[in-house]
Image (spheres, grey):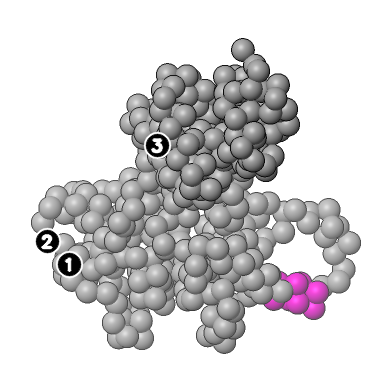
């Protein structure tokens, strides 16, 4: 075997140009496939990270009507929704896919937030506990989080994000200063910032709205106990769940959604059975629904992969062409070395030895093409990444499969020339001119 490999390299390097041209089809095919697979993998990783986040694994379980998020200030009747208590939260936490859970209120406001002459024109106001703040990856920049006394004594205190603090206080220290929310005074006790290590790539205004639209608005956080004081009504909680891993997000969100909605079913069945028109507006029922961000990522990945799979098949055609080229050159090699084959058979070489020699030569030829194709493919992938500004992630399995596949091509397409060489009659071969 080692002798066959040595002879193969000797034959390849004695006809360098011919060998290179023979390998070219293999090189181009393998390089194209490696570049496409690496680009697909990089794009899919970016899609997943951009939509899911950098390890946050947070799933929002929102109050919805007809598939749209709603709040009490939207004029929607939310009485059928359950009042979430500690026991319910503990049940959700007990799910295998759930790491933590928190509840909160949220309202969008477009006016009524002031400090001195400064006014905010668009903000999100949250009523929550410190658990929600920590789960959302907010870190204290100035001041503090809420204390137990803030909740128990219904203190009118607020925590601002850095955007809000800068807008209202023009860079001054806001701690212990007062802001007004809908005419109610609140003392600022802290400023927080999102602890985000990951920054998605923004290529369009749609991407900006997808990733940053809501988070870029100014945020004000209040203790959840004073929410009814500010808005003059009780409101069911929204829920966020932290899954144990990215793959658990879908399961964690769905289990939480189904568990909370089971209380809606119980209350609506026990309250009234007279509503015969209930089925009519089934789609308009107010219920909890988890944001299936992971599924969105999968859908985009599948679309990207299915499109790129067609390109892989097209690139595979060049491998077929390369294989035919290998067969052609091996047939030429057999013809050129007819006398050599006849001499070997005359001194006792068996058919298997001749067959093995030419199969080894074909395999070595295509394997070298495969290795050069892999190196070219990696270089091509990074070149495309720099020119087209698309992410790239080199796939090790694709590299291994490519090299093995190129070797298989050598065996398959080298088989006919090898059989021809092995079946040569030694007397005819020696007399061949």
- The image quarter containing residue 9 is top left
Q: Secondary structure at mark 1?
A: strand
> For residue 375, what is the image quadrant?
top left
What count of labels does the image hold? 3
Between discs 3 and 1, the one toward the N terminus: 1
Residue 155: x and y in percent read 30, 78
Q: CA distance from mark 1 to mark 2?
A: 8 Å
Please state the extent of the stretch shown in magenta in the rendering: 263-270
Q: Is residue 167 left or right of residue 426?
A: left
Contact flag, marks 3 and 1 (Cβ < 8 Å): no
Q: Which residue is mark 1?
A: 142
Task: Give the distance between the C-alpha atoms of the residues marked 2 and 3, in whole angstroms.
Answer: 56 Å
Residue occupying the point 61% across, 37% down = 347
Dot 2 or dot 3, earlier in sequence: 2
Where is residue 224 shown, x and y percent of the image?
Answer: 41, 74
Residue carrying label 3: 375
21, 344: nearer the viewer? 344
- Name the mark nearer the viewer: 1 or 2: 1
Residue 74 versus residue 320 in the image, above or below: below
**Mark toward the viewer: 2 or 3:** 3
Distance between the alpha carbons at the discs numbered 3 and 1: 51 Å
Answer yes or no: is residue 258 visible. yes
Mark toward the start of the polypeptide (1 vs 2): 1
Q: Position of residue 409 (x, y in %)?
A: 62, 35
| Left or right: where 19 falls relative to 129 | right
Is residue 356 highlighted in magenta?
Answer: no
User: In the image, which is nearer the foreground, mark 3 or mark 1?
Assistant: 3
Name the mark on residue 173: 2
Name the residue: 84% across, 57% down.
Answer: 279
């Amino acid at each position: 075997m080692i002798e066959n490999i040595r002879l193969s390299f000797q034959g390849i390097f004695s006809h360098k140009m011919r060998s290179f041209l023979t390998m070219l089809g293999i090189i181009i095919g393998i390089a194209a496939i490696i570049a496409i697979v690496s680009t697909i993998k990089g794009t899919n990783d970016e899609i997943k990270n951009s939509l899911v986040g950098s390890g946050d694994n947070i799933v929002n379980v929102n109050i919805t009507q007809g598939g749209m998020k709603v709040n009490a200030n939207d004029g929607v009747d939310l009485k059928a929704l359950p009042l979430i208590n500690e026991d319910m939260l503990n049940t959700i936490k007990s799910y295998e896919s759930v790491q933590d859970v928190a509840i909160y209120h949220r309202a969008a406001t477009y006016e009524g937030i002031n400090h001195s002459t400064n006014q905010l024109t668009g903000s999100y106001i949250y009523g929550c506990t410190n658990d929600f703040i920590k789960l959302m990856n907010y870190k204290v920049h100035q001041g503090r989080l809420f204390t137990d006394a803030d909740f128990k004594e219904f203190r009118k205190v607020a925590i601002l994000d850095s955007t809000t603090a800068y807008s209202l206080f023009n860079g001054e220290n806001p701690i212990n200063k007062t802001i007004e929310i809908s005419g109610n005074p609140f003392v600022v006790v802290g400023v927080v910032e999102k602890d985000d290590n990951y920054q998605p790539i923004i290529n369009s205004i749609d991407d900006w709205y997808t990733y940053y639209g809501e988070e870029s608005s100014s945020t004000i956080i209040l203790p959840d106990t004073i929410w009814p004081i500010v808005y003059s009504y009780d409101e069911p909680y929204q829920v966020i769940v932290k899954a144990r891993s990215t793959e658990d997000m879908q399961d964690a969100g769905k289990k939480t959604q189904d568990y909370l909605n089971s209380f809606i079913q119980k209350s609506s069945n026990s309250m009234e059975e007279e509503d015969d028109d209930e089925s009519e507006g089934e789609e308009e029922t107010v219920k909890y629904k988890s944001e299936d961000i992971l599924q969105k990522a999968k859908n985009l990945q599948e679309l990207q992969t299915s499109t790129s799979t067609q390109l892989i098949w097209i690139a595979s055609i060049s491998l077929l062409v390369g294989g035919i080229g290998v067969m052609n050159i091996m047939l030429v090699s057999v013809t050129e070395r007819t006398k050599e084959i006849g001499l070997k058979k005359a001194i006792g070489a068996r058919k298997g030895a001749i067959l093995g020699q030419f199969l080894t030569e074909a395999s070595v030829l295509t394997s070298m093409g495969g290795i050069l194709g892999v190196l070219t493919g990696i270089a091509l992938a990074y070149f495309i990444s720099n020119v087209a500004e698309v992410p790239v992630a080199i796939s090790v399995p694709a590299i291994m499969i490519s090299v093995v596949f190129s070797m298989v091509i050598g065996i398959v397409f080298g088989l006919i020339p090898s059989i021809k060489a092995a079946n040569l009659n030694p007397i005819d071969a020696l007399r061949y001119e």
